[in-house]
Amino acid sequence: MRILSEALGYVMYFCYYLVHNYGLAIILFTLISKIVLLPVSVWVQKNSIKMVKMQPEINRIKAKHFGDADRIADEQSKIFKREKYNPLASLIPLAVQIILLMGLVEVIYHPLDYLLHLPQDVITAFNGLAVSLAGANPESSSIQLAVVEMIKSGNYAEQFAALQSGLAGVDIASVLQQVQGISLNFCGMNLSWVPSEVGGIDIIVPIAAGISAWLLCVAQNAANVIQAEQSKLNKYGMMAFSVGLSLYLGWFVPAGVALYWIASNLFAILQQYLLNWAINPKDYVDYEELEASKQELEELQSIGGKKKLFEKNPYAKREKKDFKRFFSVVNKHLVFYSESSGFYKYYQGIIEWLLAHTNLTIHYITSDPEDQIFALAEKEDKIRAYYIGEKRLITLMMKMDADVVVMTMPDIENFHIKRSYIRKDIEYIYIPHCMDSLNMTMRTGSMDHYDTVYCVGKHHTEEIRKTEEAYGLPPKKLIDWGYCLLDRMIEDYRKADKTPHEKKHILIAPSWQKDNIVDSCLEGMLDDLAGKGYEVVVRPHPQQVRLQQDKMDRLKERYAKNPDIDIQTDFSSNSTVFEADLLVTDWSGIAYEYAFTTKKPVLFVDTPMKVMNPEYQKIDTVPINIWMRDVIGDRLDPAKTEETESKVRNLLEQKDAYHDRIEKFVEEYVYNLGNSAEVGAKYIVQAVQEQIKKAKEQ
């Protein structure tokens, strides 16, 4: 450090004799250091632009391998190597500035040593003497003159020994300033003073240092190519650190050091904008692509909802334990995944058949910590249940090691949930959780990365085959399955009490979409049905109740005095959809469950269609959702609510004809009625056996 201080001392000496003012010398010194280090700053600017230019690719790697830190690090390292990027480059200016600061502290603590260039033995002696005489009276002019004479004569050693005993009361710094005419005063304060020791006007020094740091951070957050892309937490965290460090430096070190820090911050702001003018990041970075990739990554990071600050996940330990337990099992043959407890009903028939007829161990992963599967697993040792949250599920699926994986989640590989990177031969089976069109109610390409799809009826088979044809996709295995849930509903309905109602029960069950029945025509329909001898129950979608509570309250208030109309928003009723004599809906999938189970007709309100796939018309088949409305019921124009009661009456009067029509339709368009569980389970057994056989052959 002494060598560095001496080198900096010569630079300071040069600066001082150019401007003859110690404060201006420090500012000039700072400017010279910025100029000397300009090539480094240019290199850092280019390196930073290179980093941001790579960021879209890096963001998409983070999205593709979300949750797999090792894989992300490997892929990112490959990109850095390809682009010859050094991630430590941005630290170089900071490191250089800290080194300069440390050397400069020594220069400013002993400014006259370096500015006068006295011999080392004199510097040592005078420094020691100055310390021993701290606080002495500097006005002893006779002694000061003696010291001046000693310095001028150059006979330091001899004169110093003679005068040492008589130097009491001498301010050595003051004497030396008199010799050379050097002043440490700048803007009304002594640059050798430390604000924490002196106080007074010097309190301005740390404040000025903090403000300069804040200005620099504001400029960097706006103009620095890397800093501008950081999160708010990083930006404001760095700002707090920089301001805090500057306040500390300004308070505990000489004012001259703080002046260097202030000047350095201000010159850095100017330098940043000059660099952006000379090497403009916008000429190299595709900011639209960058924003798109950031959005993709943010969507993944928001999975599971945003956590509150310091909020702990009460299931974190359990999830971690289950994750480890899942991968501790080798030779897993069969895995089911469920998004929540409500999805078990789609697997129930298949799982019950497997438990009754095979020795297969079922590994059941769920993202619902309260899933009913955990209670079932306690009673059935062939079920092993695991709780894995949505974010950790991403990693688990990428590392999946099993023969067969069964899911009701579409869009595998299209979004955050991927096929396994560990095993490429896993057979992924998709089980629908609806009976209507897959083409219209699922996103484009939702089935593309499944190996096998269970089809409810021939409409599913036709849609998938024509989708493969339209997009040039390889054919998947399609299983003529049926619908286990429908089989169970039909059986339960067969056993249910069917005592006729004195008043016909009308159930209005809207879907959750823009301009649904509640939003577009509900009140007109209710007014037309009121007082006509019906009991009308309205069950809005839970999402509508949650998000539009004020609207629900107004509806309940409006019909509170009408005994024939009940707006149900608490969902506590034990009555089922199947008890209704007629269902009124728009595009809700409940229509198929109701009609196919009870063989009763449905009144469809022609609100705007619920379309998830904007490309559904590319497929050469009309979705069953559209044409079936005229087969299993009638349609109502939402602008003609005055026709509601007449259409309801007509459907009820023709219920026997609709019963036969719907029964014939179900037999034609639903596979394996009453037997879908066995069909679905047997295929899974076959798939597992084929995987085991293949493994033995290899």
Image (spheres, grey):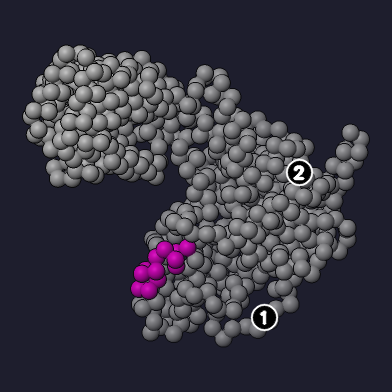
Q: Where is residue 583 in the image (x, y as percent from the top left)?
A: 55, 69
Q: How far apart are marks 1 and 2 (CA)?
A: 49 Å
128 to 123, vertically: above or below? below
Residue 371 included in the magenta stretch of the image = no
Magenta stretch: helix, strand or loop mostly: helix
Residue at 73%, 59% (x, y): give it. 385
* Quarter of the image where one finds residue 550: bottom left
Residue shown at 47% from the left, 30% from the top: 55
Disc 1 packing (10 Å; few <14; some 14–19; many ≥20) = few
**Amino acid on which disc 1 is placed:** Lys
Q: In which quarter of the image is the C terminus?
A: top right
Residue 469, position in %: x, y? 66, 33
Confirm or deny contact between disc 1 and disc 2 (CB under 8 A).
no
Where 30 sits versus 435, above or below? above
| Rendered image quadrant of residue 214 | top left
Kindly identify the residue that appears in the image at 56 percent across and 33 percent down: 61
Q: What stretch is highlighted in magenta?
A: 543-554
Name above or below for residue 451 compared with residue 435.
above
Image position of 672 (left or right of 312):
right
* Left/right of residue 241 with respect to residue 87 in the rendered view: left
Q: What residue type is labelled 2?
A: Asp
Q: Which residue in the protein does label 2 denote?
A: 401
Mark 1, residue position: 498
